[in-house]
């Protein structure tokens, strides 16, 4: 599937226009999806808060590795954070939306593997998929080995922006969640747990809207525990009203220690926060939502049942 989509797109600049067509051809997602072109909305009306800037223009490249089957597109040098809204067909829309946080170590964004393909899966199940293009790579002054604050600022703004325009986009303002992968999994968790403290000064009416996600799904996340210890980082403070969390990982993950998810699950349980954890014996990293021979390919079904248990997805969908 991935090689076919790569050849179909050809010119990377045409990907956004051709994405809806490709959705109709993805065999693993048999349910019809929206044919509407996605809407792109910039997060900030002016200067990006707390950003010192970087040199170079935003760019993309094709990436391949032994872990991922086929090529995938990466984006970096993001200085104008935005959201890209993929809406399901109106007759399939169930009102739930998920803000998608691609991974990439806070250096890049795995835009295709952990963005567009995730939006396709969500659309096929009647959910709105909204890809967050948060600032990357790390900025001068960011602490090496620690998650930078800039992406969390973008994520908080994104949740508020989506909620403030929920009615316009066919979304229930009380059913807006997040799903993140690798570094994006950390971003989803940090945003869900840290909603009580907005990390920037309000700039307009959007910021008067809550930045608390209603749920979060975190896949093969990093940065959820202190290196060489089994403690949650001080930067992650679990608020009493932290929403339900689903954690997914593989035991043989060579990039992100599965203890990141295990330690966070234990912390959530101790804090009395609704949490669920699935750790596969094999599957490694970067499995995304692809349906293949790897064990984690079943996690999307588990996630759908978890969403149903929280009345976020109608039964049988």
Image (cartoon, rainbow, N blue to C red):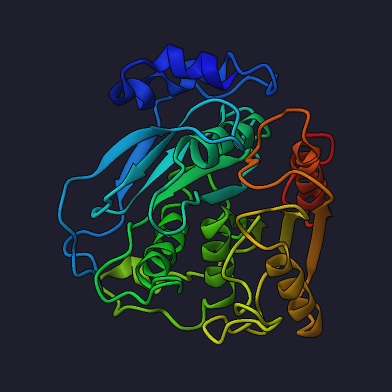
| 169 sits left or right of 68 in the view | left
Q: Residue at x 26, y 50 (%)?
A: 77
- Res 296 → quadrant: top right
Vertical comparison of 248 with 296: above or below: below
Vertical comparison of 63 with 164: above or below: above
Residue 314 visible within the image: no
Residue 202 image position (x, y, % from top left): 30, 76
| 190 sits left or right of 270 in the view | left
Residue 159 image position (x, y, % from top left): 46, 61
Q: Residue at x 54, y 42 (%)?
A: 114
- Res 271 → quadrant: bottom right
Residue 117 image position (x, y, % from top left): 55, 33
| 167 sits left or right of 15 in the view | right
- Quadrant location, the N terminus: top right
Q: Residue at x 45, y 72 (%)?
A: 145
Q: Residue at x 73, y 68 (%)?
A: 259
Numbered disc total: 0
- Quadrant location, the C terminus: top right
Residue 203 visible within the image: yes
Residue 190 image position (x, y, % from top left): 54, 71
Depth check: give the residue in front, 258 or 132: 258
């Amino acid at each position: 599937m991935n090689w076919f989509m790569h050849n179909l797109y050809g010119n990377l600049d045409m990907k956004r226009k051709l994405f809806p067509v490709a959705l109709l051809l993805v065999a693993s997602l048999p349910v019809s999806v929206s044919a509407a072109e996605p809407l792109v909305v910039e997060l900030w009306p002016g200067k990006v808060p707390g950003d010192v800037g970087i040199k170079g223009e935003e760019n993309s490249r094709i990436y391949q590795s032994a872990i991922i089957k086929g090529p995938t597109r990466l984006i970096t040098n993001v200085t104008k954070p935005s959201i890209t809204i993929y809406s399901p067909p109106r007759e399939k829309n169930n009102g739930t939306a998920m803000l998608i946080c691609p991974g990439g170590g806070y250096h890049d964004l795995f835009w295709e593997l952990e963005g567009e393909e995730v939006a396709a899966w969500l659309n096929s199940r009647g959910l709105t998929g909204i890809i967050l293009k948060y600032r990357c790579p790390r900025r001068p002054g960011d602490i090496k080995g620690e998650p930078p604050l800039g992406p969390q600022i973008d994520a908080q703004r994104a949740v508020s922006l989506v909620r403030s325009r929920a009615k316009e986009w066919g979304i229930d303002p009380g059913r807006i969640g997040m799903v993140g992968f690798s570094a994006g999994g950390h971003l989803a968790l940090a945003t869900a747990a840290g909603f009580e403290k907005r990390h920037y000064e309000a700039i307009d009416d959007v910021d008067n809207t809550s930045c608390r996600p209603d749920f979060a799904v975190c896949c093969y996340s990093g940065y959820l525990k202190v290196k060489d210890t089994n403690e949650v980082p001080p930067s992650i403070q679990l608020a009493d009203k932290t929403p339900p969390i689903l954690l997914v990982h593989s035991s043989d993950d060579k990039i992100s220690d599965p203890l990141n998810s295990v330690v966070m699950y234990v912390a959530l349980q101790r804090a009395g926060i609704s949490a669920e954890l699935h750790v596969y014996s094999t599957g490694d990293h970067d499995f995304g939502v692809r349906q293949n021979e790897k064990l984690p390919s079943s996690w999307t079904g588990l996630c759908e049942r978890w969403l149903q248990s929280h009345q976020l997805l109608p039964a049988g969908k």
